[in-house]
Amino acid sequence: MDETEFDKFAEEYQRLHSANIRISGEGPEYFAEYKVRDAASILASAGFSVRNLDVLDFGAGVGNSVPYFRSHLPGCRLTCLDVSKKSLHLGAVRHRGTAEFVHFDGVVVPFPKDRFDLVFLACVLHHIPQREHETILAELHRVLRPEGHLIAFEHNPYNPLTVHAVNTCPFDENAVLLKPRMLATSIANVGFERAAIAYRIFFPRALASMRRFEAWIKWLPLGGQYCVHARKA
């Protein structure tokens, strides 16, 4: 993982992201919140309490998800981890006192085993060379408590609008989109169980009234993004 690659976009991330997703009719806040809201729903459906959790936001960047963890996972103790020191500094200033911002060297997750209840990744792994995925996922498995959850969101390479957005986004210049089954297999290979795939973001804001039907079509591999949820045995 290249720290300088992320540092150079840290200050402009919000503006670049907003411009890149304009076609959806939504801003970065919508996409940040839906992922955290989905994570809370997944945990609740699995019978896991969503209160007072220890949460690791892996690849947190400038902390766009921080406010939504506060509202959807009440009382959580949130740690934001990233390779970009500049992004972490900006996040710590924006969200002073609401999360811990910690630097990641790209290899070893700097926490003891069995530390967290939830590891959350929001469109992070496509920035990391695939040869490194299982090493990093094994580290995330190590720091999860038994029965802890990993929830990873990624862009769907089968959706042409998503592919176009990634290909034209400055901070995705070196991104390689991951096939859902490939990611689920990598997650299973490092010891997670019951890796389940669900597709999301089928409708733009102009068709927002249709979004209530997304719960019934999560099996359809046409959504703009997808989620892989797995549990540590």
Image: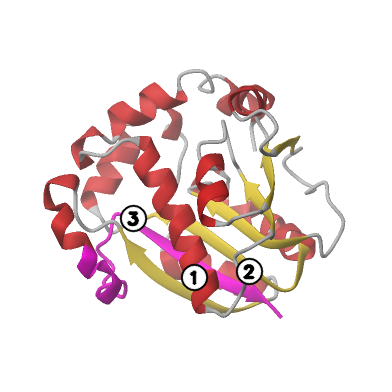
Quick one: 94 or 103, which is closer to the camera? Answer: 94
Vertical relation: 128 (above or below) 228: above
| SS state under label 1 | helix
Give the mark nearer the N terminus: 3 vs 1.
Answer: 1
Of the 4 image quadrants, the one containing the C terminus is bottom right
Residue 15 in the magenta stretch? The answer is no
Q: CA separation, marks 2 and 3? A: 24 Å
Q: Nearer the viewer, mark 1 or mark 2?
A: 1
The residue shown at (62%, 71%) is 49
- Residue under numbered circle 2: 149
Q: CA separation, marks 1 and 2? A: 10 Å
Q: CB under 8 Å between callouts 1 and 2? A: yes
Which stretch is magenta? 212-233
Apparent side of residue 48 relative to residue 27 in the rendered image (left or right) = right
Q: Amino acid at mark 2?
A: His
Few, some or many residues within 10 Å of mark 2 (<14, 14–19, 20+): many
The residue shown at (12%, 46%) is 206
- Residue under numbered circle 1: 42
- Residue under numbered circle 3: 157
Kindly tell me whether residue 125 is visible in this rendering. no
Give the percent coordinates (x, y) of residue 84.
Answer: 65, 29
| SS state under label 2 | strand
State how the image is colored.
secondary structure
Give the percent coordinates (x, y) of residue 226.
Answer: 39, 61
The residue shown at (50%, 62%) is 39
Q: Quadrant of residue 94?
A: top right
Vertical relation: 82 (above or below) 47: above
Quick one: 192 or 35, which is closer to the camera? Answer: 35
Q: Amino acid at mark 3?
A: Pro
